[in-house]
Image: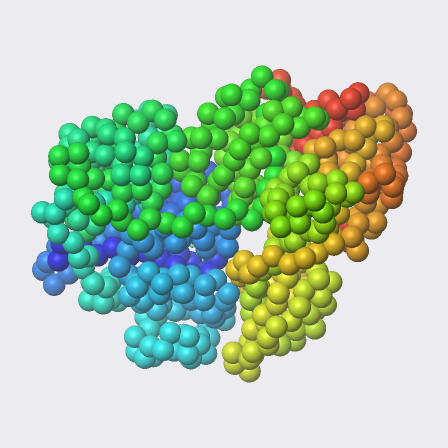
Amino acid sequence: MKHIRNFCIIAHIDHGKSTLADRLLEHTKTISSRDMQAQVLDDMDLEREKGITIKSHAIQIDHIHKGEKYTLNLIDTPGHVDFSYEVSRALAACEGALLLVDASQGIQAQTISNLYLALENDLEIIPVINKIDMEGAMIPEVTDQIVDLIGCKPEDIIHASGKSGIGIDDILEAIIDRIPAPKGDEEAPLQALIFDSVFNSFRGIIVYFRVLNGTIHKNDKIKFVHTGKEYGADEVGILKLTPTPKQEVRAGDVGYIITGIKNAKEVKVGDTITTVANPTQEIVKGFEDVKPMVFAGIFPVSTDDFEELRDCMEKLQLNDASLSFEPETSQALGFGFRCGFLGMLHMEIIQERLEREFNQTVITTVPNVSFYAYTTREPDKKIIVNNPTQMPDPSRLDRVEEPFIRAQIITLPEYIGNIMSLCLNKRGMLINQNYLSTTRVELIFELPLAEIVFDFYDKLKSNTRGYASFDYQPLDYRESDITKMDILLNGDKVDALSALIHRSRAQDFGRKLCAKLKELLPTQQFVIAIQAALGAKIVARETISAMRKDVTAKCYGGDISRKRKLLEKQKEGKKRMRQIGNVEVPQEAFLAVLKLDE
Ligand SMILES: Nc1nc2c(ncn2[C@@H]2O[C@H](COP(=O)(O)OP(=O)(O)OP(=O)(O)O)[C@@H](O)[C@H]2O)c(=O)[nH]1
């Protein structure tokens, strides 16, 4: 165990984690140059296409240092704020973290939040200034920022470039010298923490764990403490580039196990594995349950596929413990699921994974945050509203509360004005303004979550020409004037298009939404009236006149790749469309809220 080091790489998004991981793997010959490809750990197609890490990835590196052989378990983690739950789980399996800071960008919002997560887990931090090969590298400035932030000495900071390979030896040496070896007793009863799992169509369910105490052997009879279920350890092993079977995995190490688990629900991330013969008395402290930030419905395009969709969602949940869902019925869309996501990017990824990995064609409905509502009859009883249809009728409604967040924005002083007007426009309040140096300022705002989940990040970027980073934490619930906006097509209310909105915005929102729907709904052989209503009051109206129908020309508004995708989908025989009354509604229309023009 003296020769094991478990570490992860944490950083703000795009500061170069995956590229640095590639260099570490290459340098230690974990991957031969023949197998090497850029961002080798990002093995999902989606990760490669988007150039972002979505999942944490574990891999074992063998490394000889001063004549002794070491085993280094590396866990690469995502940088985007939507995936910080992945990061916190990865941290629990490590004793140390490389904290990368891009030399041209300096410390950004997620550098700080990920650092705090690492410190909460008592990890040894190795600060690294990365991308020093870049022309815009500001090494002295970034050094000062890091020294200020973590209170280390300038000489503790390693200078590196994942691109050109500078500093890789120094990093390997620091991992071995500075990160403590794992503690634990190989002879004690088995205690292994499940930190991830995945459904593999050939092998079944693969569970990833970190052994804290004891040893897990092939063919051991094991038990999951939380569920109480017992299994045979058909295969145990370690995580090389591909899973590599072993006779045993000992305390301190990271590994995988394959058992005959059939039901995805039996595996819970954060659960403890022990043996039936010599069970541990202690449960490892698991992970906090994730709190979803955004809710939306996911419906099969054809109602017959509901059970199949449920099965796929359960399998996907194995690999993404932050996804939550429960059955929902919509008048317009039939049976589906109300799902909780960590953010909009997460929602998009889930939809894409369902389509790519599980071959499902789904419709996603208007996302909203979770509100609390109270009725006049029972003013103390909180009703959780994750779906506009759960909002009590206005005549019974006492009050509504909405979630607020604390946002931290780091930017250049010249953009303070733009950011102030953006945040005030989003019903935000400035709480603090703090100069980190003469060229960098940190702004703290309190904002309603509903105002930031959809397009805030994009707006922030465009208002600051990219010179702002952003992170947020949930704060509390505050009373607010939230109202339900209904959409009617030819006089029929379409529940899947309803939205919850602050009253001050409602009129304007209704008008824009009707205009957008007019663009997105295909013209049909009859007139379609689109109306927005607050209670019984119609606040906006648009009309689509009758015309001969041309599905692709109208509903995808000229976006070629979307159009091609639609055509492909149609070839497969399933359109992402729903017939509501006599109106055909394409997927895009359900998400029209996200595309409203300012
Ligand atoms: N010049 C230079 N560019 C780099 C270096 N390391 C990474 N990059 C570039 O920076 C971008 C982001 O790198 P990634 O390794 O994908 O960053 P990441 O932190 O893993 O991103 P996420 O996982 O999505 O958070 C890519 O375009 C890389 O080519 C470096 O050392 N020097």
Q: How is the image coloured?
A: rainbow
Q: Is residue 455 visible?
A: no
Residue 221 figure quarter: top left
State left or right for residue 43 relative to residue 595: left
Quarter of the image with the N terminus is bottom left
When the figure is inspected, residue 338 is found, relative to residue 7, above or below; the finding is above
> Residue 17 location, x and y as percent?
40, 56
- 272 over 357 or under it: above or below: below
Name the side, left or right, on which 2 lies relative to 51: left
In the figure, 91 relative to 540: above or below? below
- Most extreme residue toward the front is 377
Front in this rendered view, residue 156 or 511: 511
Residue appearing at x 19%, y 45% in the figure: 281
Query: 83 or 285: nearer the eye?
Result: 285
Residue pushed farthest bottom? 438
At a point 62% along the width and 77% down the height, the residue shown is 413
- From the top left corner, tell me how far across and down residue 158 is, in percent: 32, 70
- Vertical side of 165 occupied by 552: above or below: above
Residue 96 seen in render: yes
Residue at coordinates 15% horizontally, 60% vertically from top-left?
65
* Tally of marks: 0
Residue 12: x and y in percent read 46, 61
> Who's the residue at 57% across and 67% down the image?
409
Which residue is more in the foreground, 353 or 381? 381
Please tell me in which quarter of the rendered image ligand 1 is found.
Answer: bottom left
Q: Quadrant of residue 21?
A: bottom left
- Could you say where residue 589 lies in the image, as x and y percent from the top left? 72, 35
In which quadrant of the rendered view does residue 516 lie?
Answer: top right
